[in-house]
Image (cartoon, rainbow, N blue to C red):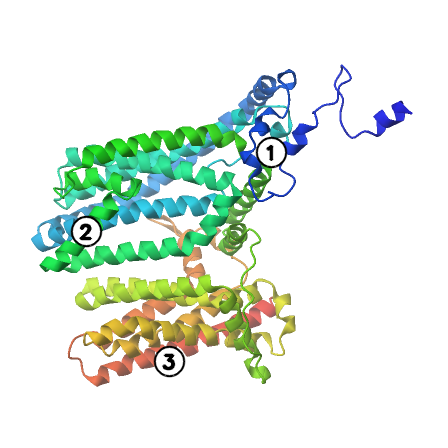
C-alpha cells in the first residue's frame, strides 16, 4: 500500500529517498493571492529549504557552460546593432547637432534669452527629476528593473537555488544601464549650459554628475519596490493622475518664470518661496541645487543638499539590492510575458499590439468605474452613446486628451509670437500635440477595427459605424479646444475661439482613418529603393504608417500659416482659408476612410 502511495505521489524523490523539493518551496512560488500584504514581505521566504538542498553553485555553473556557446553570437549581434546605431547617429545626427549648436550660440548672444533660461532652470530641473521618478514607477508596473526571461523562470528559479543569486544581477544590470544613461544626460546638460552661456563646461559637468548618477539609481530603487510589492503598485496607479498634474504645474511654473521679463517684487517673492520649498522638498530638489550653483543661481546650501542626495541614494540602493531576491515569482512571470509580447510585436512593427499589451499590464485587471448615461431612444444615437459611456468609464483618456490639447494651445501661443520659418515649425508642433489629444478620444474606433467581429452588435454597416465613431472625438475635441482658447480670448485673441476648435474635426477623421488602415505592411521596408543616402524603404514605410497624421498636420499648418489669420490685425476674410481647408480636409479623410474600409472588408478586391 505504501509503495502505491509513493508511485502516485507528485513529488520527485532524491536518491536518498527524501522528498524534493521540500514543502515550503511551493509557498515561494506565490501561487496564491496576496492576502492584502505582499508575500515578498515574509522573511521566511528566503528559508524555503535547508542548506543541504541548496544547488545554487551547480545550477549557475551549468548555466554558464551552456550559455558560453551562444555568448559569441549574442555579442556579435550587439556589435552589429551598436555599429548601425552609431552610423545613423553620425550620418544623420552630426548635421542636426551642428545646426542645433549654432542655434544655441545665437540664443546665447541674446541676454534676454539667457536670463529667461536662468529663471526657468530651477523648475525645469525639478520637472525632469520628478518626470524620471514617474516614468520609473510606471515602467515597473509592466516591466521593472528585475526582468527575467521566461526560460530562466521555467527552470533555474524552479530549482533549489538562492533567488538572490539569480535576481540581483538583473537589478545591478538595470541600475548600471540607467546610471550610464544618467551620466550621458549629465554630460549633455553640461554641454547645453556651456552653449547657452549659462556656465563653464568644467564646473557644469562636475556639478551635474551628482544628479546624473544619483537620480537614476533612486529611480531604479523606486521601481524595484513597485515591482516587488502589490501595495506600492496600487498606489502608483492611484496617484499617477495627481503626479501628472504636478508635472503640468511645474511646466507652468517654468513658463511663468521664463516669460516674466521684469517680475514685480510680489511675483519675484512668490517664485523664490516656491523654488526654496521645491529645492529642499526631496532628492529631486537636492539634485538640482549643484547645477543651479554652477549657473550662478541662488543655492547657498548645495553642499548639504549634495551630501543628503548621496546618503539617501546609498541607503535606497543598498536596501533595494538586498530586497531584489524577494520579488514574487508570479510578478516576474507576468512581466516576462508582457516584455516578450512587446519585443515580438515591435520586431514586426505592430505598435498597436505593443500598446495594448502594455496597457493591459498597467491596468492589471483593475475594473474601471461603472458610470453610465441614459440610453438613447433612437438607434441613430447608439454609437455616440456607447462612445460617451466608454469615455465616462475611462476618465484617464479624457484627462490625457485635455492635457495634450492644453500643451498644444501653449505651443500655439509661441507660434503666434514667432515669425517666418520658426512660426511654421512651432505651429506644426502645436497641431501635432492637438492631434494626439483628439486621437486619445477615438479609442473605441480602434477597438472596433482591431477585430471586425466586434462590430457584429451594430445595426449599421461598418463604414457608417466608423463615421459615427468620429462624432464624439470631433465634438469633445472642439469643446476642449474652445476651453483651451479662453486665455487667448481674454488677452485679445478672440479668433482662437474659432481656429482652435476648427482643427478637431479633421483630427477625429484622421484618427478614424488611422484605425482602419489594416495590417502593417512590413513589405514596404524591403522595396530596395537605393539612394545616395542609403535605402529609403524604411522612410516609405514610415510615410505609409503616419500618412493620416502627416497629411492632417501639414495641410492645417499650410492653411493657417498662408491665410494670415495668426497675424495681428488680419482682416476677417483671412478666416475663410482655414475654414475651407478644414472642411475640405475632413471630407477627404472621410472619403479615404470609406475606401480603406472597403479594402479592409474585401481584401481580395
The residue pinned by badge 3 equals 583
The picture places residue 27, in percent across and down from the top left corner, at: 65, 33
Q: Left or right of 151: which side holds 533?
A: left
Q: Nearer the viewer, mark 2 or mark 3?
A: 2
The residue pinned by badge 1 equals 153
Q: Which quarter of the figure has residue 407? A: bottom left
The answer to whether marks 1 and 2 mark residues whose Cβ atoms lie closer than 8 Å is no
Task: State the separation of the CA atoms marked 1 and 2.
Answer: 51 Å
The answer to whether marks 2 and 3 mark residues whose Cβ atoms lie closer than 8 Å is no
Q: Is residue 550 visible in the rendered structure shown here?
A: no
- The quadrant of the picture occupied by the C terminus is bottom right
Q: Earlier in the sequence, mark 3 or mark 1?
A: 1
Residue at 21% from the left image edge and 85% from the top image edge: 572
Pointer 1: residues within 10 angstroms few (<14), some, or many (20+)?
Answer: some
The residue pinned by badge 2 equals 273
Q: Is residue 54 visible in the rendered structure shown here?
A: yes
* Disc on res. 580: none
Pointer 3: residues within 10 angstroms few (<14), some, or many (20+)?
Answer: some
The answer to whether marks 3 and 1 mark residues whose Cβ atoms lie closer than 8 Å is no
Give the answer, above or below, for where 410 lies relative to 63.
Answer: below
The residue lying toward the viewer, choosing from 166 and 522, is 166
Q: Residue furthest right?
A: 1
Residue at 37% from the left image edge and 53% from the top image edge: 243
Residue at 39% from the left image edge and 47% from the top image edge: 135
Amino acid at each position: 500500500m505504501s509503495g502505491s502511495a509513493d508511485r502516485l505521489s507528485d513529488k520527485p524523490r532524491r536518491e536518498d529517498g527524501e522528498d524534493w523539493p521540500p514543502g515550503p518551496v511551493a509557498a515561494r512560488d506565490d501561487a496564491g493571492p496576496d492576502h492584502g500584504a505582499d508575500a515578498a514581505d515574509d522573511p521566511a521566504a528566503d528559508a524555503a529549504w535547508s542548506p543541504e538542498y541548496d544547488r545554487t553553485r551547480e545550477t549557475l555553473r551549468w548555466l554558464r557552460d551552456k550559455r558560453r556557446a551562444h555568448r559569441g553570437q549574442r555579442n556579435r549581434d550587439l556589435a552589429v546593432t551598436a555599429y548601425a546605431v552609431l552610423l545613423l547617429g553620425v550620418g544623420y545626427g552630426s548635421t542636426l547637432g551642428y545646426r542645433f549648436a549654432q542655434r544655441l550660440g545665437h540664443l546665447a548672444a541674446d541676454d534676454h534669452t539667457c536670463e529667461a533660461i536662468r529663471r526657468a532652470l530651477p523648475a525645469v530641473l525639478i520637472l525632469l527629476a520628478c518626470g524620471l521618478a514617474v516614468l520609473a514607477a510606471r515602467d515597473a508596473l509592466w516591466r521593472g528593473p528585475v526582468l527575467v526571461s521566461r526560460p530562466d523562470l521555467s527552470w533555474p528559479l524552479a530549482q533549489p537555488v538562492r533567488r538572490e543569486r539569480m535576481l540581483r544581477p538583473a537589478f545591478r544590470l538595470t541600475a548600471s544601464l540607467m546610471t550610464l544613461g544618467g551620466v550621458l544626460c549629465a554630460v549633455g546638460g553640461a554641454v547645453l549650459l556651456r552653449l547657452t552661456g549659462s556656465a563653464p563646461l568644467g564646473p557644469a559637468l562636475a556639478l551635474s554628475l551628482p544628479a546624473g548618477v544619483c537620480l537614476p539609481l533612486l529611480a531604479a530603487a523606486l521601481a524595484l519596490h513597485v515591482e516587488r510589492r502589490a501595495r506600492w503598485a496600487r498606489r502608483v496607479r492611484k496617484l499617477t493622475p495627481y503626479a501628472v498634474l504636478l508635472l503640468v504645474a511645474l511646466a507652468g511654473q517654468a513658463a511663468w518664470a521664463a516669460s516674466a521679463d521684469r517680475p514685480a517684487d510680489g511675483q519675484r517673492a512668490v517664485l523664490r518661496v516656491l523654488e526654496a520649498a521645491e529645492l529642499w522638498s526631496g532628492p529631486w530638489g537636492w539634485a538640482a541645487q549643484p547645477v543651479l550653483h554652477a549657473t550662478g543661481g541662488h543655492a547657498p546650501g548645495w553642499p548639504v543638499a549634495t551630501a543628503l542626495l548621496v546618503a539617501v541614494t546609498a541607503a535606497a540602493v543598498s536596501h533595494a539590492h538586498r530586497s531584489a531576491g524577494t520579488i514574487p515569482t508570479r510578478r516576474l512571470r507576468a512581466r516576462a510575458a508582457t516584455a516578450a509580447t512587446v519585443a515580438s510585436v515591435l520586431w514586426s512593427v505592430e505598435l498597436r499590439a505593443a500598446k495594448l499589451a502594455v496597457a493591459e499590464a498597467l491596468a492589471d485587471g483593475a475594473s474601471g468605474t461603472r458610470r453610465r448615461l441614459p440610453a438613447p431612444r433612437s438607434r441613430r444615437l447608439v454609437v455616440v452613446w456607447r462612445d460617451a459611456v466608454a469615455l465616462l468609464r475611462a476618465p484617464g483618456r479624457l484627462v490625457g486628451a485635455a492635457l495634450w490639447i492644453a500643451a498644444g494651445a501653449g505651443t500655439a501661443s509661441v507660434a503666434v509670437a514667432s515669425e517666418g520659418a520658426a512660426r511654421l515649425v512651432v505651429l506644426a508642433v502645436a497641431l501635432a500635440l492637438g492631434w494626439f489629444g483628439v486621437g486619445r478620444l477615438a479609442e473605441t474606433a480602434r477597438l472596433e477595427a482591431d477585430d471586425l467581429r466586434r462590430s457584429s452588435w451594430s445595426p449599421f454597416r461598418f463604414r457608417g459605424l466608423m463615421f459615427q465613431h468620429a462624432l464624439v472625438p470631433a465634438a469633445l475635441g472642439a469643446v476642449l479646444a474652445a476651453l483651451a482658447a479662453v486665455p487667448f480670448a481674454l488677452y485679445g485673441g478672440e479668433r482662437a475661439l474659432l481656429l482652435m476648435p476648427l482643427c478637431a474635426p479633421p483630427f477625429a477623421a484622421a484618427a478614424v482613418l488611422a484605425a482602419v488602415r489594416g495590417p502593417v505592411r512590413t513589405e514596404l521596408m524591403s522595396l530596395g529603393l537605393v539612394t545616395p543616402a542609403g535605402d529609403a524603404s524604411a522612410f516609405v514605410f514610415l510615410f505609409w504608417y503616419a500618412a493620416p497624421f502627416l497629411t492632417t498636420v501639414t495641410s492645417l499648418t499650410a492653411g493657417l500659416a498662408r491665410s494670415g489669420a495668426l497675424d495681428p490685425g488680419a482682416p476677417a476674410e483671412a478666416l475663410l482659408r482655414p475654414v475651407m481647408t478644414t472642411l475640405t480636409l475632413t471630407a477627404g479623410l472621410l472619403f479615404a476612410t470609406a475606401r480603406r474600409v472597403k479594402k479592409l472588408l474585401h481584401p481580395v478586391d
